[in-house]
Amino acid sequence: MKFTTSDHVALDYNDQGEGPTILLLSGIGGYKEVFEPIISPLLSHHFRVINVDARNQGASEHTIRGRRMSRHAIDIKELLDSLAIDKVIGIGNSMGAATLFAYISLFGDDRFLAIIDIDQSPKMISDETWQFGFKSLDWSSFPDYLKFPFGKAAVHKINDDVFADMKAAAKKYPYNPEINYPLLVDHAFQDWRDIILELNRPLLIVAGEQSPYFDPNFAATTAKIAKRASAKIIANAGHLVMAEQPVDFLKLALKFLKQNHLPPAR
C-alpha cells in the first residue's frame, strides 16, 4: 500500500488483520520484511499489523527530503491519521524505536497503548552521563565514526525464507547510506532519556544478548528511568532480535501486553 505524506513523499506499508493495532518500524537501512517472522503469529492472535518502510528505505520513496527524526515522526502521525487509528501498540527496532520516541516528543503519548523498544539505546553517544552508546561512538568520534561500515546486525541465523525476502527487497530497492547519512547523524545525536522519563505508557525494552551495536545492559538501565518499564535480554540474539529469535520475542511481547491489561493473546 502507498501513502503520500504532506511533503509529497510516498511511503510503502502493509496493513493486515483486524483487532488492536500494532505498528512495526524497522531500523535505519532496514526493510519491513525483517518483521515477517512475527507478523503471522500476531495476526493469528487477532491483531491488526501495520508494517512501514521509512522514507529512503525499502519500497518507500528515496529522496533528499526529510532526513531527520522529527520528519519520520510526522510521517507516522500522518499515516495513522489517514487510517483513523487512535490507539496503537508501537514496536520499533533500532531507529524504529527512536522514531516512536520522536513521535512522543512532538505529539505526546496519548495515541500509544504501549511501546516496545527492540535493541535501541535512548542515547547513541557515550559520555560521562551515559555508558551505553552505539559501539564505541563518543563525542570525539562523532559524527565521522558513522561513515564506517557497522558490520552485520544479526548474529543468529534468520529463517531462510525471511532472509531470502530481505535479500530480494534489498536487491529491488537498494539502500543508499550516503543519501541517508544526514538522518543517521540526526538519529545518533538524539538523547531520548527525558522522553522516557515522562512516558506514561508501559515500555518494554528488549536487548539482544549478543548485539554487535549495544551493550545489552542498556535495557535495565533505561527501564529504571521510566515510570512503567521492564527490560529483558534475549539469548542467542544480536540486533535483529525479533527476526533472530521470533518465538522468544513473541512470548515476551505478548506476556508484557497481557500484564499491562492490554489486548492479550487469544
Image (spheres, rainbow, N blue to C red):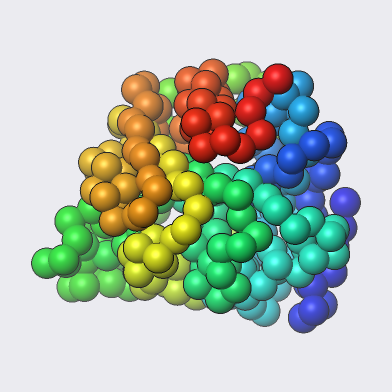
Residue 106: name its quadrant.
bottom right
Q: Residue at x 80, y 66 (%)?
A: 81
Above or below: residue 118 compared with residue 191:
above
Q: How many marks?
A: 0
Q: Quadrant of the C terminus?
A: top right
Say left or right for 262 vs 233: right
Residue 256 in the image: state x and y as whole percent.
Answer: 49, 32
Q: Nearer the viewer, residue 157 or 70?
A: 70
Say left or right for 129 vs 197: left
Q: Residue furthest right?
A: 1
Q: Residue furthest front?
A: 261
Residue 175: name its quadrant.
bottom right
Residue 82 in the image: state x and y as whole percent.
Answer: 85, 64
Say left or right for 27 vs 72: left
Q: Residue at x 50, y 53 (%)?
A: 201
Say left or right for 9 vs 204: right
Residue 211: name its quadrant.
top left
Q: Residue at x 79, y 72 (%)?
A: 5
Above or below: residue 81 compared with residue 250:
below
Question: Can see residue 108?
Answer: yes
Question: Can see residue 242?
Answer: no
Q: Nearer the viewer, residue 137 or 147?
A: 137
Q: Nearer the viewer, residue 71 or 30?
A: 71
Residue 107 in the image: state x and y as whole percent.
Answer: 60, 73
Residue 165 in the image: state x and y as whole percent.
Answer: 71, 32
